[in-house]
Image (cartoon, grey):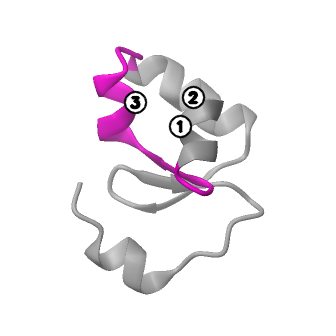
Amino acid sequence: MSELLQKNNGYLFTTQVEKAGISRTYLTKFVQENHLEKVAKGMYISQDTWADELYINFKPL
């Protein structure tokens, strides 16, 4: 999942994680261990990522 986070400039999307065949259980664990912030339904950001409100509100999942 670190690769997905890096590929998306600090954003992690539940849909991409599921498409990669990774379970939601592991996603939850990854989010907690890496201190990601949930910014929208199915969207997380790393601590060092600026939360772009336009991107968050209009990114099609």
Left or right of 52 on screen, residue 15: left
Q: Secondary structure at mark 1?
A: helix
Against 50, is 36 above or below?
A: above
Left or right of 54 on screen, residue 19: left
Membership of 41 in magenta stretch: no
Q: Which residue is mark 1?
A: 4
Q: Secondary structure at mark 3?
A: helix
Q: Which mark is residue 38?
A: none
Numbered label tally: 3
Region in magenta: 8-23
Residues under numbered marks 2 and 1 in contact, where contact means CB atoms less than 8 Å apart: yes
C-alpha gap between disc 2 and disc 1:
5 Å
Which residue is drawn at the image coordinates 29% and 25% (left, top)?
19
C-alpha gap between disc 3 and disc 2:
7 Å
Task: Residue type at mark 1: give it.
Answer: Leu
Residues under numbered marks 3 and 2 in contact, where contact means CB atoms less than 8 Å apart: yes
Which residue is drawn at the image coordinates 41% and 17% (left, top)?
22
Q: Which residue is mark 3?
A: 17
Against 59, is 38 above or below?
A: above
Q: Tell me the quarter of the picture where residue 18 sits.
A: top left
Q: Which residue is mark 2?
A: 1
Task: Residue type at mark 3: give it.
Answer: Val
